[in-house]
Image (tube, rainbow, N blue to C red):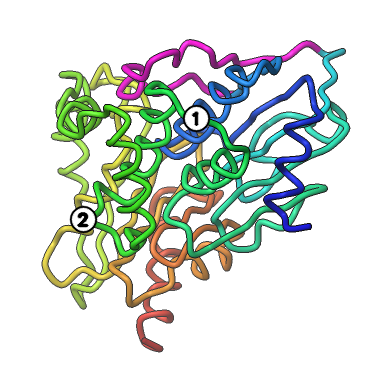
Amino acid sequence: MTTVEQIVEQIQYGKTFLIAAHENPDGDAIGSSLGLALALRALGKEVTVFNVDPVPEMMRFLPQSDLFCQSVPEDASYDVAFVLDAGDVSRTRLPIRELCRTMINIDHHPHSNFGDICFLDISACATAVLVYRVLVACGHQLDLDTAKALYLGILSDTGSFRYSSANAEAFDVSGRLIALGIDPWEMASQLYESHAPERMRLLGMVLQTLEISDCGRYASMSLTKDVLERSGAMEEHADGFVNYPRSIRGVEVACFINELADDHYKISFRSRGKVDVGQLARDLGGGGHHNAAGAKIQASLTETRAIIARHLDQLLARS
């Protein structure tokens, strides 16, 4: 029995389901979670879809995005728990193992090897594609709301089909979802061209922190709590800012340094493809893909920049 067949069997015989993805959810985490939740509900299942953080404002246009909850009862129990796009179960911020009979991990991040059933495919453009494969194997006929959720996962994780992850399957599945009635322009417009004024003010302030290395091969921007407060924006408004330094000619690696607390920073890395930032992130205690990864560093902002620069200098010297 294949992994997908095992998952289909769990869906057929399970009655109660929990779906959870990583904290600070991106489009793939939201899209794959919501798409799976809507499909399971259509199959007559009892479904709780959880994320410790609210759905980002720019994704709330998705139909039924209000299904997400930020807590589950302490005495809750589920036949099956799906952990999606998480890399590590701890990133859900839930004691998943204690809440379910069977844990199913569906992911496309390398080294994501937990769960009673682990459906891992690092060649997939997004976890949403893997959820699509499962639903097709179930013989489920997707409705438009489910299609929109899965399409958003693919659209966001491929950078609107600009990233190297935009493989043939990404276009094939997206085409099938569009055929169900999706308007690609409307989806792209809602996700990328409906920004809050606060986001644009914040971007203007963050762009002033841009630093480009002497070699010109990496660049960074930073966001502190003070700047966030002065801008009137929320942390979610900084989503995607890491792509601005990556767009600079000659830059191979971009870094976005986000202050979580005093002397505690979350680092997002993006690569143009030559440099494996996934390995860089793992060296710093984090994880991710070859072209997109993240880590956390406990140090001052100056020290954090120095740590990143030291690692990148060593990494680039070998590439």
Is the N terminus in the top left, top right, bottom left or bottom right quadrant?
bottom right
Mark 2, Cα crowd under 10 Å, few <14 / some 14-19 / many 20+, is: many
| Magenta stretch secondary structure, dominant | loop
Q: Quadrant of residue 49?
A: top right
Dividing the picture into quadrants, the one containing residue 156 is: top left
- Can you identify the residue that label 1 sits on? 141
Q: Nearer the viewer, residue 281 or 136?
A: 136
* Region rendered in magenta: 52-73
Query: Who's the residue at 48% across and 64% down the image?
Result: 123
Q: Amino acid at mark 1?
A: Gln
Image coordinates for residue 277, horizontal then vertical, percent: 43, 67
Left or right position of 171 against 104? left
Mark 2 residue type: Pro
Q: Are marks 2 and 1 in contact (CB under 8 Å)?
A: no
Label 2: state its secondary structure.
helix
Whether residue 171 is in magenta: the answer is no
Residue at 62% across / 38% down in the picture? 138
Among numbered discs 2 and 1, the one appearing first in the sequence: 1
Left or right side of 295 for 10? right
Q: Which residue is mark 2?
A: 245
Give the left or right position of residue 295, taking residue 230 as reference: right
